[in-house]
Image: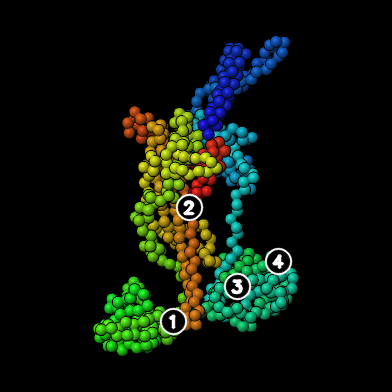
Amino acid sequence: MLRHFFALNRKKAKKMLASLLCVSLLLTALPLDVAAEEIGKAAADTADVTVTKDITAGGAKKTFTARVTAGKTADSVTVTYDTLGGNKIDSVTLAAGETIGRLPEAIKKNAVNNGWYLDKQCSTQFYEDEPVNRDITLYAGYDEDKIKPETPEYNEITISDAPEDFSFSLISSQSITDDNLQDVISIENQFGEMPLLKVENTGSGVYTVKPVINWTEGGAYVLSLIDNGVRFDGINSDIMPDEKIRTITLFVYREETNNVKLKDGIVTIPKSRIREDDDNEHIYMSRSEFEALSIHEGTVIFADDAEEPSYLNVVSYELFGDEYKILTVGSDVDDIYEELDIYFKEKYVENDVLAEAIDTEKLVEQLYESEGTQQLTYMLAAAVYDSKTVRELGDGNAPFELMSNTYMDGVNWNDKQIKLNVKELLEGLTISAKVGTAKNTNFKCINGFPNEQDWTALNITFSYEMTLKNKVKLEAEVSISEYLIIGVGGTLSLKRDFNVKFLPLSQTDVTFKILVCSADEEEDDKQQDNEEKRDVSVEIEAIMNGEDKESGNIIKDVREMLENKGGA
C-alpha cells in the first residue's frame, strides 16, 4: 500500500513538471507585449482570453496557444447544472471564492450519477470543496452500467370480513374449467379448511369461481395468480385497479369471540404454599391444606403465581408425616376448559407497548461495548483514511496509522493484516438513543391495507469528535433510524384450532453528517471554532459504498475483511 502511495506521488510530480515546462515554453515563445495587448482588451471584465502565436524554429513552423483568465473578480458567480438528459436542477448563485457545499444528485433513467464535471466529456471532475471564482456549468456524469434497482410494483391487496360464500371472477383469453383452475390460480389455506370451488363461464372471457363448500368462518387464505394471461375482475379495491392485482389475502368474516369457561372442580392454591421436589415431578403440600381442599387422584390444581402460574393433574399421592408428596403431570387443555373459543381480528401492537419494551439506557450501555460499534468505527476510519479532502487538510498525510494496534489484532484476510488505529476515534465517541413514533413512507401498504399507522421509531446516533494527528478536526455523526410495527391476530379453540398471525415489519435508514476542518495544535479553541468546516458527508458515504473512483483500496479491503469475520 505504501509502495502504491509513493507511486501516485511520482505520477503527480511528473504531471507538475510537465506543466511547468509547458508554461516556461509558452512564456518564452510568446512575446509578453503580444500577450499583454490581447489580455488588456478584456481587462475591463472577467473573461477567458485565448492567445495564439506562430513560431518558426529549426525550419519548422509551430503554433502555440495559451488560455488565460483575465480581468476583475466578480462579486458573485453562478453555477449552472446540466444533467445531460436527466432531471432539471436550478442554478445557484454564491459569492466569488465560496464553495458550493453539498452537490445535488442528478437523476437519469437507467443510470446512476457518479459526480459532476467541468466538461461534457466528463473528464475533469469538480468537487464540492473547490472554490468557485467565475460562472461555471457543471455536467452530470453517469455510470450507465450501474442501474438503480427499481422498487417492485406492489400488486397485493387484502380483503377482510369476506362472506363464507365469497366468489371472485377471472378474465382470461383461454378457457378456465374446474379441471385446470389449479394451473391458473394458487389458493393456500393459512387457516381453515379448503373450500370446494366450481368455475362458471359467464361469457366474454369472464369466469366466476364460486364455493360449493364454503370458506371457513374466520379462516385466512392467499389467492395468487399463476398465469400471466389471467387477471382478477370485479374486485373493486380502493388500493389498486383489478388489472394490477396479482395476490389477494382473504380473511373470512367471523364475530370476535372470547368464550372461556373453566371446568368445575379445579383447586386453586398460591404457589408459595407448595414446595416443589428436585425431580420436577412431585410437589409437597401440608396435610391440613391437602385434606381441606379434598384433593384426590385426577384433581386439577392451579398453582397461582404472578410470574409462573401452572395447571397440574394429580396422578398419585402419599402421606409423609405432616406433608403429602404428590406426583403430578402438566394439565392438558381438555383438563382445564369446559369451553374455549377465542377469535380476534388483526390489531397493531400499541406503540407505547413497543416503546416500553426498549430500554434505551441499557441499549446505549451495550452499544459502547459491542463489536458492531467497533466495526462501524473501523469502517468510518477507513473511509476517512481514503478521503481526498481529509488528506489535503492534513498536508497530504494519512489521518490514521496503518499496521498499528487495534481491537482487531490477529485478524487475517488473504494473508494481509489491515489495521487502523481507531483508539482515539472510539475515545471521542458519544452514543445516544431515543424512542418515539413516526410515519414511514417507505411502505405504501401493510398487509394489503394503506399504510396510515404510526410506527415506533428507534433512533441511535453515534457522534465522534477528535483531532487527527493535530492536523484535521473531525466531527462525525452517524444516525441509524429503525422503524417498527407489529400486527397480531388469531384463533384458539378446544378443537386444537390454534392460529396466530404475527406480522413484524421494520425499515432501517442510515444518514451521515461528516464535518472536517484544519486544526493547528498551537491555535486556541476560539480560532479552531472559527475555522471553516467542510461537509464531506457525500464523499465519505460514497467511499463507504464503494462509489468513489478516486479513493484507495483500504475501505474495500476492510469491508471484505469484516464480512469474512462475520460483521459489516
| Residue tagged 4 | 229
| Residue tagged 1 | 333
Query: Residue 477: x and y, percent?
Result: 42, 45
**Closest to the observer: 119 or 78?**
119
Alpha carbon distance from label 1 to label 3 = 28 Å
Alpha carbon distance from label 4 to label 1 = 49 Å
What kind of residue is marked 4?
Answer: Gly
Q: How many marks?
A: 4
Alpha carbon distance from label 2 to label 3 = 34 Å
Q: Nearer the viewer, mark 1 or mark 3?
A: 1
Left or right position of 435 against 28? left
Res. 188 mark: 3
Q: Looking at this rendering, what residue extends furthest in the front direction?
A: 320
Mark 2 and 3 residues: CB-CB less than 8 Å, in contact? no
Instruction: Residue 112: name its quadrant.
Output: top right
The first of marks 2 and 1 along the sequence is 1
**Closest to the observer: 530 or 478?**
478
**Closest to the observer: 78 or 359?**
359
Res. 509 mark: 2
Q: Nearer the viewer, mark 4 or mark 2?
A: 2
Alpha carbon distance from label 3 to label 4 = 21 Å
